Image (spheres, rainbow, N blue to C red):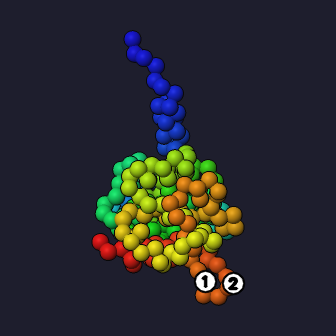
Amino acid sequence: MNEPKPAWIIEKERSKRENYQETIWLFGLHAVRDALENPTRHKLRLIITKNAADKLSEAIKQSGLLPEFSDPRKFSAPIDSQSVHQGVALEVKGLNWGEISEVCKPINNGSRVVVLDRVTDPNNVGAILRSAEVFGALAVIAPLRYSAPETGALAKTASGAMERQPYLKVKNLGNTLDKLKEMGYFIIGLDSEGESEMGNLGTILDGPIALVLGAEGPGLRHKTKDICDVLARITPTKNFGSLNVSNAAAVALYASKKIDKT
């Protein structure tokens, strides 16, 4: 007689089933083109105008999906009417990037990951995914709750990066940061009152780095700060002004990449 499955396995299997059942409507030429060309993306429905179909003809052919044509004056896809859809919308299922232990396994001393502490604005997260891809980050990590879900708005801001840049959701951010430490990452929290200047961390940056950024306004939570190995600031030229979280992520990624010597 088989023994019953442990509760944690049952919960993990249920969560995977639920995630697989969820669908997302992507829109916009860049986001849809990259999703159509992504062999790992499960594609369900393509609603498109004749003009947009002409622009995406190669990607549509490659996907093997049969498009449903729509009148541009009455675009029939079930998305917000205010969305800048550019005449195309694609229903897909979420991507499964895999486990942190595999996706974030350090490749070399220049390995970088970005961790988001309750950043919920899809435009900011989309921009961060773009920067993470540009600077070669292995992944962007966020908590399951209080984070921006995969949506059409996020995908459009990411301009295709959502198809290529791992965006991992975790149940407990603190435990994940501890796991990253065990994997060899040095944890740098971005904080306006950090004791160190991001550009002056020197040899600290000669190894795998996890950059942790908090939400606009509240910033990093206290318990997140306590886990970080160092808190670093991006000092403005004047005594006023600050960067939003997506710009701060880009600057921090560039600063850490520039100083890396591998």
Mark 2, Cα crowd under 10 Å, few <14 / some 14-19 / many 20+, is few
Q: What residue appears at the point 59 percent right and 70 percent down from the top-left corner?
A: 194
Q: What residue appears at the point 49 percent right and 53 percent down from the top-left corner?
A: 177
Between 109 and 126, the one lying in front of the other is 109
- 89 displayed left or right of 257: right
- 108 displayed left or right of 159: left
Residue 52 visible? The answer is: no
* Residue type (three-letter) at the residue carrying disc 1: Pro
**Residue at mark 1:** 236
Q: CA distance from mark 1 to mark 2?
A: 7 Å
Residue 76, placed above or below residue 200:
above
**Residue at mark 2:** 240
Asked if disc 1 and disc 2 are in contact, CB closer than 8 Å, the reply is: yes
Residue 171, placed above or below residue 196:
above
Q: Secondary structure at mark 2?
A: loop
Residue 222 percent location from the top left of the image: 65, 57
Mark 1, Cα crowd under 10 Å, few <14 / some 14-19 / many 20+, is few
- Can you tell which mark lies on residue 137? none
- 9 displayed left or right of 171: left
* Residue type (three-letter) at the residue carrying disc 2: Phe
| Farthest-out residue, bottom | 238
Residue 46 percent location from the top left of the image: 49, 59
